[in-house]
Amino acid sequence: MKRNVKMMVVVALVFGASVALADKLSDFKDAASKDGCDSIPYSDLRSTCSSGGSGVTDWCKNSSRSVSCGSDSITRDLKNKIEQARKNVENLKDKKRKLEDDKSRATADDDKNRIGKEIEAVDKDIYEAGKLVEQAVADLETRKRLVETTMDNINKCIDYRRSVMNVFASALDKVRGETDPDVVPYARQLRDKYEETKRGHEIAITEKNNALSTCKDSRP
Amino acid sequence: MNHVRFARMNANDFVDQLRTAFPPEPIQGDGAFVQWGTTYSDVGLYTRAVDGKTWEQLDPNVLLANTDALGFLGTRHLIAVLPVYLRSVVEQGVMSPAAEMLPIIFARPAPGASTGLGHARFDALVDALTPAQRTAIAAALSGLATDSGSPGRAAQAALDSYWTPA
């Protein structure tokens, strides 16, 4: 009786092992013919890859999220605009002060009236120039918020891109370690795939790192 | 801003230049990623987006949302879709979604360095380009290089690495 039980256990183990091997072989065959995350034969890594891929779609490719600050020259231009607008206000104020001096020295009523009207005109110009300063400051503030939001988005995008690249690096390590003779030919195919496509992932990360660096340079 | 002025002045002429350099031939989506991009996560989406279309029929929104594809596409397919990205940088300047990517793709790796497409792929790309296509790429990079910020400097570096005549 005891012997029969032992035999049954051994048969079950051998059968289980061969089923597992058949499943594994099937996973590798499938993976070798597929692309993207489906080219990973290990279900845990495949699942991590898929969720990383969804993160990439959401944080790197979603048109509702900004992932570019354009150029740091945009921020510089906005700051120059504020400086110029402020200079303009100061020049107008100088002009007004001179006119007020002129008016105080004028003796004839006609001159006083004429200069008074000029001062009124300059006051209007100062008001308009002040509004331009306010607008330029608001534009820079908007830019600052955009830059900060974009940096957050890019950081998340990079995290997801790195996670996808790291999954393929882990998959590469694992396929290199495969020793089963039936699996090895497919493991080699997969190894080549992962190695050939590594650069694509690196380029995608470099692009976002450059975009992040542009944003850092774009902080007002 | 200089980059915007340049783009607006030359956009129409540049599209004509692209039409001459990149004939409107239908792109075969199949195999676009076989050479260098089987692990790219959007193989299916991108392949469907380009299959059977000429470059002018491509949806720029889809292609520009997927600038990462440029690092995974095979040489022939990369050249086939380039006009969409080149046009975008000339029309939108540094605000183009391709403005950070193109200088990486077009920068020839320095000897001993393994940057951008890498030596083998970069050489395969420039070998497969016609003189008119090379001129169009140089023009797009020159437009981007008018920006005084970091994207402009990256574009200038890419130009200097290969595309500017000695």
Image (spheres, grey):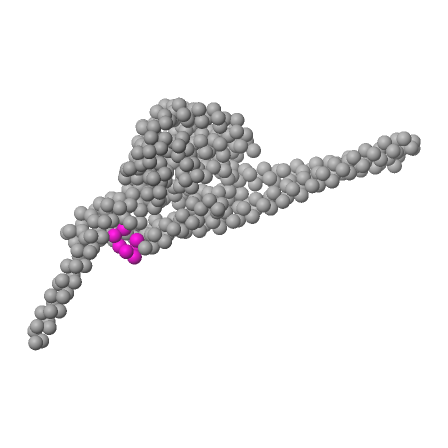
Q: Residue at x 49, y 50 (%)?
A: A152
B16 sits left or right of A188 in the view: right
Residue A108: name its quadrant: top right
**What span is colored magenta in the figure?**
A40-46
A112 sits left or right of B37 in the view: right
Residue A41 lies within the magenta run: yes
When the figure is inspected, residue A6 is found, relative to residue A77, above or below; the finding is below
Q: Residue furthest bottom?
A: A1
Taking depth in this image into account, of A182 and B58 the one nearest to the observer is B58
Q: Quadrant of the N terminus of chain B?
A: top right
Q: Residue A81 location in percent, x, y?
A: 63, 38
Residue A176 visible in rendering? no
Q: Residue A80 location in percent, x, y?
A: 62, 38
Residue A23 visible in rendering? yes
Q: Residue at x 37, y 52 (%)?
A: A52
Q: Residue A170 location in percent, x, y?
A: 29, 52
Q: Quadrant of the C terminus of chain B?
A: top left
Q: Residue at x 14, y 65 (%)?
A: A13
Residue B76: name its quadrant: top left
Q: Residue A218 location in percent, x, y?
A: 53, 43
